[in-house]
């Protein structure tokens, strides 16, 4: 009988993960027990994905705000520090800002506007137009910002992040000055020691600051790249990808975990004879049309994955084939013609008109986004995701 189902994404429930837990055993057992309970079986090229949170928790990859403060002070001098381009997030950045401010005498906080890097808005473009402000060139003081725009609370959180971040800095014992600008080198009018907090544009920002004469430049990816007084760390990403654990502690992005995904793959093969792919995933990469927020606040969607997940999709657009190449066919003839096109397609369809409109994104970004949407970020209790049929096509 012809198959009637394509891709299926399942949230797999697992235990609450603590430091030192064996994630290989937990992931494999959870998936196999779910299969037995729900009456499905594993197949070759199924994908098992673990949220980065449980990987970091099992690794015990935590740090305190004091650890952050000590590293910031050591690397940026502990005087006046420019903190530029942070995202507006209570979970992601506020706790880091507390530690940063504890490591400085004064923080010059430079916020991008009208929104941060991932789309959280301070203002709208309509507000800027009405005020005659050019965000590409105009620098606003806090006083000018308040004069023109007053208080602006985030649509979803109800937080005035300008006030919120200012209070965090002051409560940490540092003086604060707030400015609004979108050119990195603007901060050098205030201090030559800079911590740039952008995520996906950080390499360019650091390059521009150094070229403009900054004395000391760090990104969030340069803080806690090694252990500070016994803390956790991330050698590659530092504070990037971290989020709040307690009022005084953060959970960092997982350390190297390629060995974990490969061990899970090997264990599934040993127990079932099926060759699955395995990945660790964080934020998905997609944009919310209502709040304009781009979800990806992690440095990457997937910090570790098995080799079968390298690359991008190589797919034909079925509707293009139906409307162009085979527009005079219908019914079983049309289906067979399309199936034959799929079976004989080139291994690389770049530039082929029949592939236009397919998504030229990394497999890990696409699958990781599906995983993030399936698991959610709240209380679903499904930190492991099983995706079946993702690599199937119309001929299977």
Image: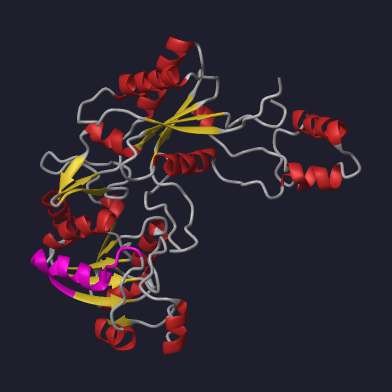
Question: Looking at the picture, does residue 95 appear above or below residue 2?
Answer: below
Q: Which residues are magenta?
A: 156-176
Quadrant where the N terminus is found in the figure = top right
Question: Looking at the picture, does residue 175 appear above or below residue 319?
Answer: below
Q: Quadrant of residue 143?
A: bottom left
Q: Nearer the viewer, residue 168 or 184?
A: 168
Q: Residue at x 13, y 51 (%)?
A: 248
Question: Looking at the picture, does residue 289 appear above or below residue 112?
Answer: above
The image position of residue 11, as x and y in percent, is 42, 33
Q: Is residue 167 magenta?
A: yes
The image position of residue 353, as x and y in percent, is 77, 48
Q: Residue at x 50, y 61 (%)?
A: 289
Left or right placement of residue 110 versus residue 324 in this view: left
The image position of residue 396, as x and y in percent, is 69, 25
Left or right placement of residue 174 versus residue 120 in this view: left
Left or right placement of residue 318 versus residue 192 in this view: right
The image position of residue 117, as x and y in percent, is 40, 63
């Amino acid at each position: 009988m012809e198959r009637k189902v394509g891709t299926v994404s399942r949230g797999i429930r697992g235990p609450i993960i603590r430091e030192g837990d064996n994630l290989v055993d937990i992931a494999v057992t959870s998936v196999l027990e779910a299969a037995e309970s729900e009456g499905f079986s594993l197949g070759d090229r199924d994908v098992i994905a673990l949220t980065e949170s449980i990987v970091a928790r099992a690794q015990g990859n935590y740090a305190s705000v004091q650890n952050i403060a000590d590293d910031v002070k050591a690397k940026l001098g502990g005087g006046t520090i420019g903190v530029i381009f942070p995202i507006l997030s209570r979970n992601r950045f506020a706790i880091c800002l507390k530690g940063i401010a504890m490591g400085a005498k004064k923080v010059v906080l430079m916020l991008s506007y009208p929104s941060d890097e991932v789309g959280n808005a301070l203002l709208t473009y309509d507000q800027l137009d009405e005020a005659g402000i050019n965000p590409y060139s105009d620098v606003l003081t806090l006083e000018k910002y308040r004069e023109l725009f007053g208080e602006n609370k985030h649509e979803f959180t109800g937080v005035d992040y300008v006030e919120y971040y200012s209070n965090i800095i002051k409560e940490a014992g540092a003086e604060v000055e707030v400015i609004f600008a979108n050119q990195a080198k603007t901060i050098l009018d205030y201090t030559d020691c800079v911590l740039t907090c952008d995520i996906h544009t950080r390499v360019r920002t650091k390059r521009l600051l150094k070229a403009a004469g900054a004395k000391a430049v760090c990104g969030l990816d340069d803080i806690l790249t090694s252990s500070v007084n016994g803390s956790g760390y991330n050698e590659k990403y530092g504070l990037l990808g971290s989020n709040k654990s307690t009022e005084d502690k953060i959970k960092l992005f997982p350390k190297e975990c390629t060995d974990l995904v490969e061990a899970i793959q090997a264990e599934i093969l040993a127990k079932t004879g099926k060759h699955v792919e395995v990945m660790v995933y964080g934020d998905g990469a997609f944009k919310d049309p209502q709040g304009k927020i781009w979800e990806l606040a992690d440095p990457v969607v997937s910090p570790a994955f098995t080799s079968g997940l390298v690359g991008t999709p190589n797919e034909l657009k079925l509707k293009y084939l139906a409307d162009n190449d085979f527009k005079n066919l219908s019914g079983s003839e049309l289906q067979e013609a399309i199936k034959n096109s799929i079976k004989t397609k080139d291994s690389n369809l770049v530039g082929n008109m029949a592939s236009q409109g397919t998504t030229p994104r990394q497999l890990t970004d696409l699958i990781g986004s599906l995983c993030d949407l399936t698991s959610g970020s709240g209380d679903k209790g499904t930190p492991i995701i099983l995706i079946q049929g993702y690599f199937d096509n119309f001929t299977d």
